Amino acid sequence: MTANAPTNPYAEWFEQLRAEYGDQLSAMPLPDGLPEYLHQLVQTGDEEAIKFMLRLAWQLGAQVGYAAGSRQGEQVSVMRPDHLKA
């Protein structure tokens, strides 16, 4: 990447997460058939279906994080890059 190239804060954030948690998460099995289905979506270029999967995962993760924080009586913060707007 050149010094003047624009950066994508989410790409940087995900790469940081992958560096920190990649080994742990790669050891976690996915449901049977999901990797093959995702591969099919990528091969056919079904970007809308992939975006839907990401939105669903993001929403479910946010709900789980909120519930976990609520049980502990703590304020929940969402992990996202500091310089992005909602």
Image (spheres, rainbow, N blue to C red):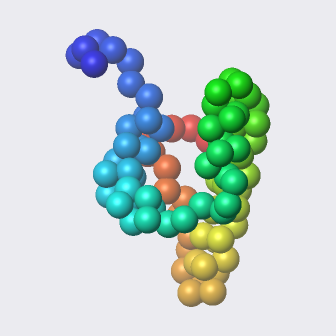
> Foreground residue, 11 or 75?
11
- Asked whether 59 or 51 is in front, the reply is 51
Quarter holding the C terminus is top right
Left or right of 29 on screen, residue 62? right
| Among the 4 quarters of the image, the one containing residue 8 | top left
- Give the quarter of the image for residue 81: top left
Quadrant (top left/top right/bottom left/bottom right) for the N terminus: top left
Whether residue 71 is visible, yes or no, is: yes
Up/down of 26 relative to 8, above or below: below
Q: Residue furthest bottom?
A: 72
Instruction: Look at the image and tell me whether residue 54 can be seen.
Output: no
Relative depth, front residue between 24 and 40:
40
Image spot of residue 41 (x, y percent): 70, 34
State the residue in front, 73 or 8.
Answer: 8
Residue lying furthest left in this view?
3
Which quadrant of the structure image shows residue 22? bottom left
Identify the residue at horizontal 69%, vertical 24% (top origin): 45
Q: Residue at x 64, y 31 (%)?
A: 42
Percent coordinates x, y for residue 6 in the rendering = 38, 18
Is residue 16 placed above or below 76 in the rendered structure? above
The residue under the point 32% across, 57% down is 20
The residue drawn where x is 50% and y is 66% is: 28
How many numbered marks, from 0 up?
0
Residue 43, image x and y in percent? 65, 27
- Left or right of 81? Residue 47 is right
